[in-house]
Image (cartoon, grey):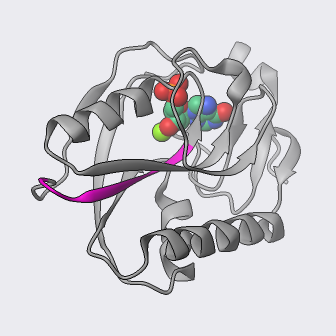
Amino acid sequence: MHKDLESILVGEQELNDIVKTLAADIDRDYGDKDWLMVGVLKGSILFMADLMKAMENDFKIDFVVVSSYGSGTESTGRVNVLKDVSQSVEGMDILIVEDIIDSGNTLHFLVRYFYAKGASSVKIVTLFDKPDRRKVEIPVDYVGKVIPDEFIVGYGLDYDEKYRTLPYVGILKPEVYTE
Ligand code: IMP
Ligand code: MG
């Protein structure tokens, strides 16, 4: 385990099981139609890669980069699109892939953003959900695991751009972000 972690919250085997379950659910619901999976960079990178590999059906992929956090652990509430999708989403069914939902600000913004660009449907899959922290109510279609109000890192999730490459998810020691 990484020295900055208090404990491991979700190990590699459990991550694998979660991803397989989500992949089967999404495969079943989307079937063979032409649709677009949009990953929210950078946090969703490992989750999305594993999810895609676990799915039977073919679909298109794209990415957005948004910012709202700076280097802290609290959402600022403002969301900016730093990199947009690179194709028209007019008439497309979109599934947004997110690492974690916290305040809900990012996804609340993105869902409206894609509808405003003409998408015909916009759904959400998130690996983790911290419902205790929600500030904006937002319907989430697929949730990997509900977690307590702790700041977690690994498997794509970062603190100040660190720990994304860990193959498991752990709880960061509070002294790492309070000192
Ligand atoms: P929201 O807009 O407050 O829902 O925040 C969503 C974004 O905040 C996620 O995409 C993450 O990048 C980041 N985030 C929220 N909680 C955590 C956490 O526990 N660890 C790492 N990143 C987090
Ligand atoms: Mg993120």
Range covered by the magenta-colored residues: 90-99
Vertical side of 54 occupied by 136: above or below: above
Q: Is residue 9 left or right of residue 16?
A: right
Q: Residue furthest bottom?
A: 56
Which sits in the foreground, 60 or 32?
Answer: 32
On the question of residue 41 being in view, the answer is no
Say whether residue 127 is magenta.
Answer: no
Name the foreground residue: 134 vs 44: 134
Quarter of the displayed picture in which ligand 1 can be seen: top right
The residue at 42%/14% (across/down) is 77
Relative image position of residue 143 (x, y in whole percent) = 64, 49
Residue 27, x across and y down, in percent: 51, 76
Residue 25 point in image, percent of width and height? 60, 69
Q: Residue at x 78, y 38 (%)?
A: 147
Would residue 91 appear left or right of 33 to someone viewing this image?
Answer: left
Q: In the figure, 104 relative to 115: above or below?
A: above
Q: Main secondary structure of the magenta part?
A: strand
Q: Position of residue 121 (x, y in %)?
A: 31, 50
Query: In the rendered view, does 178 fall on the left or right side of 38?
Result: right
User: Considering the image in quadrants, where does the C terminus appear?
Assistant: top right
Figure quadrant of the N terminus: bottom right
The quarter of the picture where residue 94 lies is: bottom left
Q: Residue at x 14, y 41 (%)?
A: 117
Q: Nearer the viewer, residue 142 or 65?
A: 142
Note whether residue 149 is visible: yes
Residue at the image point whose x is 67% and y is 74% from the top: 20
